[in-house]
Image: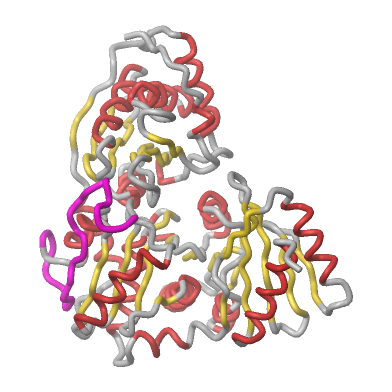
Amino acid sequence: MKLVTSIDLSLSFKAYDVRGIVGESITAETVRAVGAAFVDVLGLSGQTVLVGGDMRPSSPEFAEAFADGAVTRGANVKMLGLISTDELYFACGTLEAAGVVFTASHNPAAYNGMKMAKAGAIPVSSDTGLYEIRDAAQSYLDSGVEIPSISEGPHGTIEHIDVLADYSAYLRDLVDLSGIRPLKVVVDAANGMGGMTTPAVLGDTILPALPLEIVPMYFELDGTFPNHPANPLEPENLRDLQAAVKEHGADIGLAFDGDADRCFVIDENGDPVSPSAITALVARREIARAKALGEETPVIIHNLITSRAVPELVEKDGGRAVVTRVGHSFIKAVMAAEGAVFGGEHSAHYYFRDFFNADTGMLAAMHVLAALGAQDQPLSQLADEYEPYVASGEINSEVQDKESAVSRVLDACLGQDVTVESMDGTTVSAVDGSFWFNLRPSNTEPFLRFNGEAKDRETMERVRDQVLAVVRNEG
């Protein structure tokens, strides 16, 4: 089969993964070339490559195309079938093999993409081979000839395996939920992969029942997302879950994104619990567990725009907090370098040393259930301890000249008692600790992202409104 395409792979290859519109910037033909390049660049001829996909309509075809390209270059492919992204990380970690999952996470139905990992679940990003894979695949496509077989021997092999049961048992071993008080849990899977992993891990379809009453919402796997987008970062996508938690008198609500590597939490009143609060709660549990095993000063990773409550609690509990840039490849690299036990991001990605330094929404949810079920307070009261400050949330402003907008803000801050840092955008902090804010430019869109936090709502709103007015050149 000759490869004839005019598709420019740079349109779909991002810094951390691949995302594109099906039939336009990502096709079975391009995916087959990427499968071959994946083997070439990572030196996987004769080795195992894991291939799976989410519930999007194009994922099965793309998984087969990638496998075809990979075996042509000599890899032995294990097809994982339907998987969440954290199932891929589990498989890469336990089977010590590189792999790919076809998913576009929370993107709309027209999209699909790839998340790649090396053996041990080490991420493949722009710093660790992703762009080299892109360029090698582009060369195959541009040459217009069939991908050549390796000269050393025959094609690789393809076999099919299922890792869901082992994945579920692995998570159950990490967090024991068998002794908690009974909890009613509403789970909104948004027609994504959480609809498959939730019954397996938290239900009784594979393992013994837990003291959890699961109220399912949108568990049917459907990559057209007929109920609402699978992006719980947007408040409107949480409204069904919030209403259901109150309607059922539930103790907690959980919302997963499309590939189930992120989890958002709703309390019994239907109010969101901030990802920073979840980071602090899980950090406390992981610090205590690591100390009980003899670790003197467990390390916790958090990104720059996580609440200041996180490092404060970590230090109070005898851990060491390490700040890093936003982005999973940065977090995972620092996790490995520091030997960190846990890491959290404001976007509800949670990383665990015991899960190959990878992010998993399900394991984070289990920690929250364990903490809630081990005491009698409702979640709203439990979470209060971890949310001492008032946060703005992320606010985007469409700005063409982002650098000038930041300069205007810094000029407006002249004479104030503040400090300025330049890690991952620009962070301005009041010396008295009353507020801080960060301005971070998007790499792919004309947006300047504002995140801020203060000791009280009045201060947060004042700082937010003043900064955004300068950014947007208002008044």
Q: Residue at x 52, y 71 (%)?
A: 298
Whether residue 264 is visible: yes
Q: Write the start and end of the magenta stretch as one range.
A: 205-229
Q: Is residue 220 magenta?
A: yes
User: Could you tell whether 374 is left or right of 422 in the image?
Assistant: left
Q: Is residue 172 above or below residue 143?
A: below
Q: Residue at x 55, y 86 (%)?
A: 388
> Dividing the picture into quarters, in which one does residue 96 lie?
top left
Q: Quadrant of the N terminus?
A: top left
Among all residues in the image, which is located at the extreme front? 475
Main secondary structure found in the magenta portion: loop
For the residue pair 56 and 94, the one nearer the viewer reads as 56
User: Could you tell whether 166 is left or right of 270 in the image?
Assistant: left
List x then y, in percent, for residue 431.
Answer: 78, 80
For the residue pair 33 and 298, the one nearer the viewer reads as 33
Whether residue 287 is visible: no
List x then y, in percent, for residue 49.
Answer: 33, 32
Q: Quadrant of the C terminus?
A: bottom right
List x then y, in percent, for residue 79.
Answer: 24, 35
List x then y, in percent, for residue 189.
Answer: 26, 60
Q: Is residue 236 above or below residue 386?
A: above
Q: Is residue 302 above or below residue 83?
A: below
For the residue pair 235 and 391, the one nearer the viewer reads as 235
Q: Is residue 174 magenta?
A: no
> Dividing the picture into quarters, in which one does residue 268 lie?
bottom left
User: Could you tell whether 65 is left or right of 34 in the image?
Assistant: left
Q: Residue at x 45, y 55 (%)?
A: 357
